Amino acid sequence: MSDEPIVKIEELHVSIDDTEILRGINLEIRAGEIHALMGRNGSGKSTLALALMGHPSYEITSGSVQFLGDDLIEMEPWERARAGLFLSFQYPQSVPGLQVGNFLRKSVQAVRGDEAPSARDFRAELNHAMEELDVDKQFLARYVNDGFSGGEKKRFEILQLLLNRPRLAVLDETDSGLDIDALRTVSKGINAATVDDTGCLIITHYQRILDLVKPTHVHIMIDGRLVMTGGPELAMKVEENGYDWIDS
């Protein structure tokens, strides 16, 4: 396995409506690594996720992002997804009129391209993923995120993760609003998806998901900068003491 990073972010600056949010981010994620990104509300965590995915409201003003050796910034959002970047949204949007089963099949075809499975193989993959996440088959006939509970929305995000098989999964507060049973199920799916040649960036406020999805690196973001990096013990210290000790 190559030691080259899946993503290499250098001196990344991002603004929204001429207001700078990210102020020089440097980060590398390699295959098999799980990075946790923690910080107060408004520190810039979701801005990093959305900028990586190419959201048009987030302007990259300077810096570079290499994804598998290619310039990510020059790619359209669909090209980033096709290249192997996946974003699980903090607040997934509903799409009335689009059935879950049809959406999943079309998204896998679009993202995996020539490597997309046949209809028969897709059904086998889908059944396996739904079993992993304890999702009932009637779920497929519902409309995308329409009337979903918070837990159902997060399960659906991880179901997409399992089927799309990205090289880098960026998970924006996937644990928010989950009870302990749903958290265990979602964590099981994340662990199943982040193996071998896949990396993961988990954005979270809480230690509890990191008890189930073991991070190799933990980063603290304050005011748009990564101010501290460590191992799992850093997340535990934040859980116990908050962020004031970092500011001091």
Image (cartoon, helix red, strand yellow):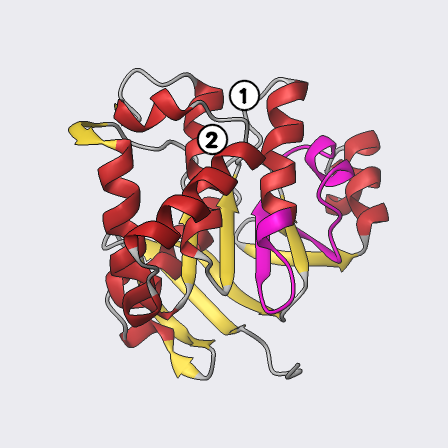
Check disc 2 and report the residue beneath it: 154
Q: Is residue 185 above or below residue 54?
A: above
> Can you give x and y, in whole percent of width and height, for residue 50 in the image?
38, 51
Residue type pointed to by label 2: Lys
The magenta-colored residue range is 192-220
> Can you give x and y, in whole percent of width and height, for residue 152 in the image?
44, 23
Residue at image location 62% in from the left, 49% down from the top: 192
Residue at image location 58% in from the left, 41% down from the top: 189
Where disc 1 sits, the SS reads: loop
Q: Quadrant of residue 206?
A: top right
Q: Is residue 139 above or below residue 13?
A: above
Callout 1 crowding tier (Cα within 10 Å): few <14, some 14–19, many ≥20: few
Q: Residue 199 vs residue 227: left or right?
A: left
Q: Is residue 222 above or below residue 204?
A: below
Check disc 1 and report the residue beneath it: 177
Where disc 2 sits, the SS reads: helix
